[in-house]
Image: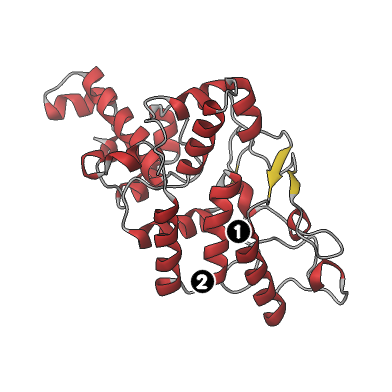
C-alpha cells in the first residue's frame, strides 16, 4: 500500500484493489510510515512528525529506502522498544565498530556523542571543531549548540562531561591531525581549523548539508543518516536507533522532576514531541 501511494495511486484506488475501505488504507499506511520514522529513520522527516499522504509522497524515495531496513516491531525486544539502551549494549556497539567499521575512531566518537548529547544527527553533522575545543585546545565541558545548526533554531547547552566520549573524540581529532584533514598552520585548536566540521566524511571532507526544500527550514545530511544506520546495523539489535538517545534523555529528565517544557528546552523539542517521546515508555531499569 505504501509503495502504491508513493507511486501516485490514491487511497481510494488502493482501497478498491485490496477490497477494503479508504480509512483502512490510510490507517495502515500512516501506521507503517510512523514506524519507519521511529524504528529506521526517514531522511528529512523527524520521527515525531505525523505522516500525511502529501509528506509520504514528497519523501517517497526515503520512505521506500527505510522499508528495506525495516524490522517489524514484533521482532524487536521489549527493552529496545522502550527506547532504553544499556551501557552494556553501547559497549557491544563500540566493539562491533572496532571490528567492522572503516572509520573506527570517527564512528566510535559519533556513537558516544549521540548518547551523551542527545542531539539529532543533523545537528551533530554540523558541529564545528570550535564547538568542542577552545583556542587552547581544551575540550569544552559545557558548549552551546548554535541556533543556526539547531533544528529548532534556538540555542541550547551541550555537555561534553563524559571522559569516555571526550577520549573518543580526542582520538579521532588526533587522527585528523595526522592525516592533515581540516588543519591550519597554527597551534591553536590543536592545529585544527576551528571552523571545520567536528566530524568529517571517510575521505576527510565535510559532509554535504542541503536544505530540505519547500517551506521547511530543516536541513538534510544523507551521509550522517547512513553512518548511524550502518553503526546500528553492526550491533544486530533491532529497535535501537538515533531517537533512543532523546528518549532516554527525556525519561531521565522526567524522573528527576523536570516539566515537559523544561525537557523540550533541553532537547530542542516542542511540547507535543516530548509527549511522543515519553508516551508508552517503560520505566528505566536499574542494575
Is 75 placed left or right of 137 in the picture?
left
The residue identified by callout 2 is 104
The residue identified by callout 1 is 165
Residue 186 lies in what quarter of the image?
bottom right
SS at mark 1 in the image = helix
What residue is rendered at 27% in x and 43% in y? 77
Is 185 placed left or right of 252 in the picture?
right
Mark 1 nearby-residue class (10 Å; few <14, some 14–19, many ≥20): many
Residue 269 lies in what quarter of the image?
top right
Is 185 placed left or right of 21 in the picture?
right
What residue is rendered at 36% in x and 48% in y? 66
What residue is rendered at 27% in x and 23% in y? 27
Way the structure is coloured: secondary structure
Sequence-wise, the earlier of marks 2 and 1 is 2
* Image quarter (top left, top right, bottom left or bottom right) of the N terminus: top left
Q: CA distance from mark 2 to mark 1?
A: 14 Å
SS at mark 2 in the image = helix
* Image quarter (top left, top right, bottom left or bottom right) of the C terminus: top left
**Tag 2 near tag 1, CB within 8 Å:** no
The x and y percentages for residue 12 are 24, 22
The x and y percentages for residue 53 are 38, 28
> Residue 200: in sight, yes or no?
no
User: Extreme front residue here?
Assistant: 287
Residue 173 lies in what quarter of the image?
bottom right
Amino acid at each position: 500500500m505504501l509503495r502504491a501511494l508513493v507511486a501516485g495511486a490514491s487511497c481510494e484506488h488502493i482501497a478498491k484493489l485490496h477490497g477494503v475501505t479508504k480509512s483502512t488504507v490510510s490507517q495502515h499506511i500512516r501506521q507503517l510510515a510512523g514506524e519507519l520514522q521511529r524504528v529506521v529513520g526517514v531522511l528529512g522527516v523527524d520521527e515525531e512528525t505525523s505522516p500525511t499522504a502529501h509528506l509520504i509522497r514528497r519523501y517517497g524515495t526515503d520512505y521506500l529506502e527505510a522499508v528495506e531496513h525495516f524490522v517489524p516491531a514484533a521482532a524487536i525486544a521489549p527493552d529496545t522498544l522502550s527506547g532504553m539502551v544499556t551501557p552494556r549494549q553501547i559497549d557491544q556497539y563500540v566493539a562491533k565498530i572496532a571490528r567492522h567499521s572503516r572509520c573506527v575512531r570517527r564512528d566510535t566518537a559519533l556513537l558516544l556523542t549521540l548518547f551523551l548529547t542527545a542531539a539529532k544527527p543533523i545537528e551533530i553533522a554540523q558541529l564545528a571543531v570550535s564547538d568542542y575545543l577552545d583556542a587552547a585546545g581544551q575540550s569544552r565541558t559545557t558548549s552551546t549548540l548554535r541556533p543556526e545548526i539547531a533544528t529548532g533554531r534556538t540555542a541550547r547547552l551541550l555537555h561534553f562531561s563524559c571522559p569516555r566520549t571526550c577520549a573518543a573524540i580526542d582520538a579521532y581529532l588526533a587522527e585528523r591531525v595526522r592525516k592533515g584533514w581540516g588543519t591550519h598552520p597554527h597551534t591553536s585548536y590543536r592545529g585544527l581549523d576551528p571552523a571545520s566540521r567536528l566530524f568529517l566524511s571517510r575521505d576527510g571532507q565535510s559532509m554535504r548539508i542541503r536544505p530540505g526544500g519547500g517551506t521547511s527550514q530543516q536541513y538534510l545530511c544523507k551521509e550522517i543518516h547512513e553512518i548511524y544506520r550502518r553503526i546500528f546495523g553492526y550491533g544486530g539489535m533491532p529497535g535501537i536507533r538515533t531517537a533512543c538517545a532523546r528518549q532516554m534523555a527525556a525519561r531521565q529528565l522526567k524522573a528527576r522532576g523536570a516539566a515537559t517544557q523544561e525537557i523540550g528546552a533541553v532537547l530542542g523539542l516542542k511540547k507535543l514531541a516530548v509527549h511522543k517521546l515519553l508516551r508508552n515508555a517503560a520505566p528505566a531499569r536499574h542494575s
